[in-house]
Amino acid sequence: MKKKIQWGKFSKPMILVAFVIILTILRPDSFPTLGNISNVLWSVSVYGIMVCGTIFVFLVGGIDLSIGSLCGLSAVVIVKTIHAFGDTEGGVAAGIMAALLVGALAGVIHGFVITKFKVPAFLVTFATSSIFLGLSMVLTNNKIISCLGPDLFTAIGMMKILGFPIPIYVMLIIAIVSWFVLRKTPFGRYMYAIGGNPAAARLSGINDTGLTFLAYIFSGISTALGGIVLASMTQQCMASTGSGYETEVITAAVIGGVSLLGGEGTVPGAIFGAVIIGLLNNGLNLMSVPSTEHGLVKGIVIIAAVAFDALQHQDQAKKGFSFFSFGKSKKTA
Amino acid sequence: MKQTTVRHLISLGMLLVLIVMFSILSPYFLSPDNLLEVARDASVVGIIGVGVTYVIITAGIDLSTGSAMALVGMTMANIYAYTVWPIWIMLVFGILVGLLAGLFNGFVVARLHLPEFIATLATMGIYRALTYAIAIRDAGGVIQSQAMTDSGFTALGGAAGPVYLVTIALIAAIVIGQIVLKYTRFGTNLYAVGASQKAAALSGINIAKVRILAYVVTGFCVAVGAIFTTARLQSTTALLGDGFEFDPIAAAVVGGVALSGGSGDIVGTLIGALFMAALDNGVLKLHMNTAYQYIIKGIILILVVMFDAWYKGRMEKAAQEKGVKEAAAENE
Amino acid sequence: MSEKGETILEAKEIFKAFSGVPVLQGVHFDVRKGEVHALMGENGAGKSTLIKIITGVYSKDRGSIFWEGKEVEINSYKDCQRLGIACIYQELSVIPPLTVAQNVYLGREPKKGGLIDYKKMNEMTAELIARYDFPLKPETIVANLGIGQRQLIEILKGLSCNSRLLIMDEPTASLSGKEAESLFSIINTLRKNGVSIIYISHRLEEVYRLADRLTVLRDGKNAAVLDQADIQPLRVIELMIGKTVDESAGSSKQMRVSKNEVRLDVRGLTDETGRFRDISFTAHKGEILGFGGLIGAGRTELVRAIYGIDKFKSGEVYLDGKKLNPSPKRSIKAGFGFVPEDRRQQGFIPLLSIEKNVALTNYDIVKRNGAAISDASELAMCKEAIKKIDIRPADPEKAVGLLSGGNQQKVVLGKWLMRDLKVLIIDEPTAGIDVGAKNEIYELLESLAKQGVTVLLVSSDLQELIRVSHRILVMRKGSIVKEFDKETVTQAMVLAAAQGLEESKEAAS
């Protein structure tokens, strides 16, 4: 068998390049400017940081609808903590710890209820999403709380190294860690196995409930990290910080080839999805489509991507089924 | 019917505990005026809850009801602002948009085979975006809240005697909803599809049709809910129904409609809707931060699903043990 | 109107092949009015294909079907309903949250003024129930009923559309003894009422009790049609197996039956739900120990418990004299491998590549570069597996879901071969696999045994069981009832033991 050229491998970079070219042609004055590109990178980095953790949940076949409000809650927690410590650098450290802890705790709650009680993940995270939003509202008293210092805090979101803002580096680091875990460790392989066929995974000695639990904790932590970066970038927080981010992250994931049915997807793919979402949002803004109407595009993208995915799964299941049920098989000799 | 009754009693018990608690904390809570207000607030949730209950009985979910409400409201606002058509035509268009939104949900779920929560999460975004796209703007392009003050329309938001019209509509919705569920083939098919799609297909039921129809009914209920809401507010905004999808789902779950499908009924959802409204009202009357509504509702939703999961597990275990005992008795 | 004894259904010269492999070769089958006609045959004899042709699920290649003397074409469920044929599926199609009456009339509810007329529906159901004397009430919610009663609802459903021919496929497979008894008495009532029944079963004792006539299929052909008087268990077994079975095929290969040290020692294993009770046996190093028995005898449940997927209530498992506390993880560590019965549901991860499926249980032995899995080592392992058991296509990147059944099974098996295996448990290893791959798997098991691996083989394919096993334990209703040596065993002996016939020894001679 001769190797065919795998166009599939190049399709993602090509889409990306096409996107950039189209936007450059459509908005030659505003798109290819340093300021705009750096804007895109900022927003990409927040989605990217989050999707690197939530991909674990998607891989085991779960979902996290609380991403947006948990992101908001962690932003509120870090800002409130910094204020509580009198805007000191120690406060920033404490704030980061507190926000990450909140994220991890959210993951523990999700993991516990979902794996112990076998309650559908979407409902649990739908409910906690309401809880987190309520907590943010209580903590902020429904007001915008700004946080302009200390420098250490604003540096997280604003400082640039070699021309790139720090969040990009944060995203790269967490992406590499997440990629390494998923691609290079047994632990990562087990995630794919659980999402692909939980029964077979269990028979292979994989602790599926334990690992599913962990996936939700990762998701919580990465979401909190996204919230920290977002708070620093905007130098403020409010209850609605991060509102709607669950859709952004889920869209980024499905664009990047992560299956919401579980067992399929990669970190580079998810990051690619985040970049596309960033460009998409930016492009729509530059075309003067108000952000309130972006949901139309994203909704259609989600439906198209997941429907395509579902169709493929179905085909594969059918193919296997026919082999299995009739025992027909071509002679391989 | 025994298990259903037990579950209803549990929901009723929860409602009673809540009422007793609030009436101790706030003497005003039990006054007739306030109770009518609770009934009014429960009404829109309950009406939409009828549709959502149908969807959940088929083992589905609808996260798009809040956005669809806004879309219905904004459609009517456009007709109100830019045409001289009579009010009833405006209402017809509102209903039509609701039906279409439901139809689209059903199509994506049943024909494109998307998981329900993903499908309706996506359409939730789509309907909200469409609402903004057709939102009424001033000369500067700023989105305005559109007043709809025609007396024929706002009368819908009023009361007949002591009872709000919307509450009467709720009663009608509950009665019709329960009759359709229990006394028509469609209702029976909803349970069949929710309990086991495979078994339903073997019995010759057109599964896709039943699922789509459940979403269409929800769309209708959403439109009715939107009409009463905008009539009472005498206006609509692009933000109408933001976060509202939570309440009908929570009402159904509190009322014992199992997310795994195949069980529950409208009576349960009514109790659940009253519970949600009483909770909202109590938090307000106690002058607590409204944020607590979100927190308490979220916690209650989780606790109820956990309880139902635990209870179901216990029943199954008991049934299994019974089977083992019988088998053992046979071996003697 | 047809009289009792007249032929109601007749299938003549039915031929059917799947992608060139003949499954039915000129089968004749007829059912008379008011008779219970049993259909028996080994796995793969063509029973289910024949039934699926009669019920319109498959189309026949050649042959004709007559209903009350007239030739008919049956292409769908609707055609069956129109003629009056109802099939009681093993997988029940009742809806638990609905009542008995609602289930019986699902989709055909009587109406009054547009609404379902429950009064009439319940009356109609009550009437049906009374006519056949079923232990049911129209208004009971099905969720509260046992599996046996649910099956009766299926039968009622068939009867309510005036079906005159009921097809029952292994109806007692999941019933308790008491439930089965009540089913038998209902079958007798139905027969008295002129309803014909096609009764498919592996269980001779049931067929012996119930059937007016019996058709035995073997290799897609009629082996015999017996009248009630001629239904003798041993004769039926002979017919099912055929006299031309090549008994020497297995024993000619002079396998040294391992009398090495005991590797696996199972003592008094009993599970919580009584699916197996007080199971004790030992298996030696390098021995292939076969488990025979009918479906539902508890073999799968037993091996699952030994491996540690399901919990058992009491008893002990010892490996090389050390007591185990089985769980899949611990069992794998101790040297177990497990190939499950249902490959697609439990065997492999369809979306993952051959490479990753093979490596899934072996990350303790795949080399590492620091914390990272060595891709080279993983690939080498996969290539070794591909070479060792000839997986096709030999492409490590290929998703296992896209392979043929035989190659999927090789992948499932292959991952265990990469380990230092002590015990391999393999359940129905060749179900739905073509002949070529079958033989490869047999050879593989034999070579594993030669290397000292103990193999526990569960198989419902008697030929396979006898060919591959060194020793055979036969289970029946959750207990081990017989033990056979390879040298002396025949298919008839295993089948007789599985059926609970005492004269199994005589059958051999």
Image: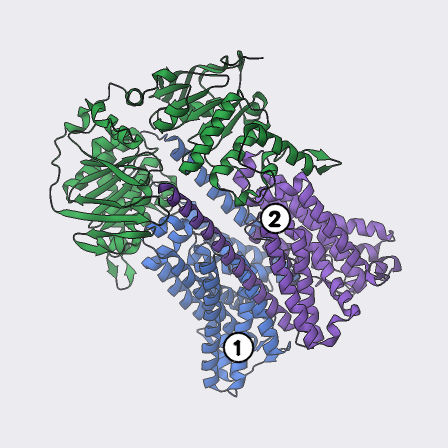
Chain colours: A blue, B purple, C green
The residue singled out by tag 1 in the image is A77
Q: Of helix, strand and loop, which one carries label 2?
A: loop
Residue A79 vs residue A118, the one in the foreground: A118
Q: What's the residue at 56%, 61% (across, down)?
A: B304
Mark toward the viewer: 2 or 1: 2
Residue at x 45% of width, y 77% of height: A97
The circle drawn on residue B1 is 2
Question: How far across and down, in percent of the image, does residue C174 sit?
Answer: 42, 38
The x, y position of residue A198, in whole percent, is: 40, 51
- Residue B140 shows in the view: no
Visible residue check, residue C479:
yes
Q: Which mark is residue A304?
A: none
Q: Name the residue nearer the viewer: B63 or A34.
A: B63
The amino acid pointed to by label 2 is Met
Q: Is residue B241 left or right of residue A145?
A: right
- The vertical placement of B325 against A142, above or below, is above
Q: Quadrant of the C terminus of chain C?
A: top left
Give the class, few, some or many, for how many residues have Cα within 10 Å of label 2's Cα (few <14, many ≥20).
Answer: few
**Which of the chains bears the disc numbered 1?**
A
